[in-house]
Image: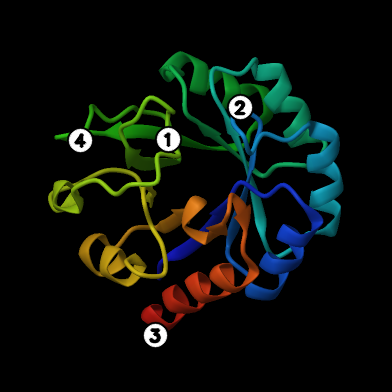
């Protein structure tokens, strides 16, 4: 069964939309981005969120104590790492707070080396933005993949998510700009994206 993550929530309206659609995960971005939110706003949004939905905090080379405090405060359930975090960093993060870790990898013409000591990987299209480029990579690169469960990101939308799931059978599909209109989360697009994945799961 493929799960769904809606990333980049910023408003109460976004939370209302996901509470209706019920994806498995949502993402709060704490890294430099137009979708970046403060810990205070994240706490407020988490309090409005359906408890069945887990929160992924998105970070780039963040101080471990910041992630620890967000996890211990119950604001995030998992940490998604988009920077240069190495095996030592991931081990220290786990020792520090025990949260599950998603290590994001940028995919160009080939899969990059796979890190160790991570619960999940996330494959996204290579870009200067460390993710969030809004374009897909060549899913055929995952045909011979053997490793931890992974999140598939990069240019997903209602138009291609079924093809993506059928081609790669990921643990989870991860969407942000693909469920937005004019840069803001779109309730109808979120509902349609989640519905398509759930129907495809049978």
Secondary structure beneath label 3: loop
| 174 relative to 187, above or below | above
Task: Give the mark nearer the N terminus: 3 vs 2.
Answer: 2
Secondary structure beneath label 2: loop
Mark 1 touching mark 4, by CB under 8 A? no
Q: For residue 50, say whether it is visible.
A: no
Q: Which residue is mark 1?
A: 131
Please name which of the two marks, 3 or 2, marks the residue nearer to the observer.
2
Q: Residues within 10 Å of mark 1 (few under 14, many from 20)?
A: many
Residue that appears at 23% across and 29% down: 112
Q: Which residue is mark 3?
A: 202
Q: For residue 106, say whether it is visible.
A: yes
Give the alpha-carbon distance from disc 1 to disc 4, as whole Å.
15 Å
Give the alpha-carbon distance from disc 1 to disc 3, as whole Å.
30 Å
Task: Give the mark nearer the N terminus: 4 vs 2.
Answer: 2
Please tell me in which quadrant of the rendered image residue 159 appears: bottom left
Please tell me in which quadrant of the rendered image residue 14 appears: bottom right
Residue that appears at 86% across and 35% down: 40
Please state the horizontal and vertical placement of residue 119, each as a whole percent of the image.
45, 40
Q: Residues within 10 Å of mark 3 (few under 14, many from 20)?
A: few
Please name which of the two marks, 1 or 4, marks the residue nearer to the observer.
1
Report the disc number at residue 31.
2
Please name which of the two marks, 4 or 2, marks the residue nearer to the observer.
2
Give the alpha-carbon distance from disc 4 to disc 2, as whole Å.
24 Å
Residue that appears at 71% across and 26% down: 68
């Amino acid at each position: 069964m493929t799960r769904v993550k809606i990333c980049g929530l910023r408003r109460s309206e976004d939370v209302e939309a996901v509470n209706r659609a019920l994806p498995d995960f949502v993402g709060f971005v704490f890294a430099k981005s137009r979708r970046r939110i403060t810990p205070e706003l994240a706490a407020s949004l988490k309090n409005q969120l359906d408890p069945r939905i887990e929160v992924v905090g998105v970070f780039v080379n963040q101080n471990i104590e910041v992630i620890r405090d967000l996890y211990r405060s119950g604001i995030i359930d998992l940490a998604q790492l988009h920077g240069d975090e190495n095996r030592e960093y991931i081990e220290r993060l786990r020792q520090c707070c025990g949260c599950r870790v998603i290590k994001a990898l940028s995919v160009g013409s080939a899969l990059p080396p796979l890190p160790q000591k991570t619960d999940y990987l996330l494959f996204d299209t290579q870009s200067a933005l460390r993710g969030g480029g809004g374009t897909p990579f060549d899913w055929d690169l995952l045909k011979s993949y053997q490793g931890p469960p992974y999140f598939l990101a990069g240019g997903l939308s209602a138009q291609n998510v079924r093809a993506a799931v059928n081609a790669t059978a990921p643990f989870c599909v991860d969407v942000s700009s693909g469920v937005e209109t004019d840069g803001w989360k779109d309730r109808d697009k979120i509902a349609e994206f989640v519905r398509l994945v759930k129907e495809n799961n049978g």
